[in-house]
C-alpha cells in the first residue's frame, strides 16, 4: 500500500495516525528520510523487529539496525552519557543526514537479543518521519532499502519500492523521490570522533 504525503512541511496528522496504528500492529513499513528510503518498525515491538530482520535475511541478534529519534532528548534512554564535545557536534548536525554510532546502554541488548555495545542514532531532516516517531512515542528501528550496501535506482522511487516489497511491508510512504546517497556515519562509541563513511552529510568538525 502506498500512502502519499505531498509536502514534508505541511503534515497531515490523520495520515500520521494511520501510519502509527500500522506500526503498533507489529508491521514493517518504508519511510522517507533526508537520504535513502528505509525499512522501519516500532522499536518496542519484538515481532516487528524479527520481521524486519527476516526481510534483510538475517537473524535479529545479528541485525545492525539504527534508531530514528525525534530529537536528542531521548538519547539517554538508549545510550550511555555523552561527553560535551560529542553532544555539541550532534546538536549542530541534527536533524540532518548523519548516523552517529554511540555507546549503547543495557536496554539495547535486551531489545535486540544480543550483546550489542553500540547503537546507531539518526534524526533525519524529514518532518514526516519525525512526526511518526513523535506520535508513536518512541524511536523507530530502521535499515536502509538497498541490497548489499549498493543503492540502485529502484530504492529511490517509492512506487518501485512498493512494487518490489509489497508482500513484505504493510505500507510505503510516498514523499517523492529519495536521495541515492546514504548518510555520513560518525563513530563516537569510544569517546573519539571517527568518520566511518562519508555520505551526503558534510564533515564540519
Image (spheres, helix red, strand yellow):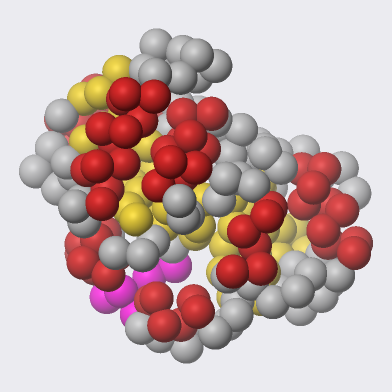
**What residue appears at the point 39 percent right and 76 percent down from the top-left corner?**
111
**In which quadrant will I find the N terminus?**
top left
Left or right, 79 with reference to 111: right
**What residue appears at the point 59 percent right and 69 percent down from the top-left corner?**
77
Residue 130 image point, x, y percent: 52, 38
Residue 112 location, quadrant: bottom left
**What residue appears at the point 32 percent right and 33 percent down from the top-left corner?**
17
Left or right, 200 with reference to 48: right
Return the residue found at the far left. 167
Closest to the observer: 161 or 115? 115
- Measured along the vertical axis of the image, is residue 188 above or below residue 197? below
Closest to the observer: 146 or 159? 159
Residue 202 image point, x, y percent: 77, 38
Q: Is 62 part of what is drawn in magenta? A: yes
Q: Is 137 part of what is drawn in magenta? A: no
Residue 123 image point, x, y percent: 60, 45
Closest to the observer: 106 or 183? 106
Residue 105 location, quadrant: bottom right
Can residue 132 be seen here? The reply is yes
Q: Give, as a single range, the part of the protein colored magenta.
A: 59-64
Residue 124 image point, x, y percent: 58, 39
Amino acid at each position: 500500500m502506498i500512502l502519499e504525503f505531498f509536502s514534508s512541511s505541511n503534515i497531515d496528522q490523520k495520515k500520521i495516525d494511520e501510519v502509527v496504528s500500522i506500526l503498533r500492529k507489529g508491521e514493517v513499513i518504508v519511510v522517507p528520510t533526508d537520504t535513502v528510503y528505509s525499512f522501519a518498525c516500532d522499536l518496542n515491538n519484538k515481532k516487528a523487529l524479527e520481521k524486519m530482520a527476516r526481510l534483510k535475511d538475517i537473524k535479529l541478534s545479528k541485525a545492525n539496525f539504527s534508531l530514528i529519534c525525534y530529537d536528542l532528548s531521548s538519547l539517554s534512554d538508549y545510550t550511555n552519557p555523552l561527553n560535551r564535545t560529542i553532544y555539541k557536534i550532534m546538536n549542530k548536525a541534527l536533524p540532518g543526514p548523519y548516523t552517529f554510532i554511540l555507546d549503547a546502554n543495557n536496554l539495547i541488548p535486551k531489545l535486540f537479543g544480543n550483546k550489542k555495545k553500540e547503537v546507531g542514532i539518526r534524526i533525519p531532516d524529514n518532518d514526516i518521519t519525525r512526526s511518526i516517531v513523535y506520535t508513536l512515542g518512541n524511536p523507530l528501528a530502521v535499515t536502509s532499502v538497498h541490497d548489499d550496501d549498493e543503492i540502485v535506482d529502484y530504492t529511490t522511487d517509492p512506487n518501485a519500492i512498493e512494487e518490489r516489497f509489497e508482500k513484505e511491508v504493510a505500507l510505503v510512504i510516498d514523499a517523492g523521490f529519495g536521495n541515492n546517497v546514504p548518510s555520513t556515519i560518525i563513530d563516537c562509541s569510544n569517546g573519539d570522533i571517527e568518520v566511518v563513511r562519508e555520505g551526503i552529510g558534510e564533515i564540519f568538525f
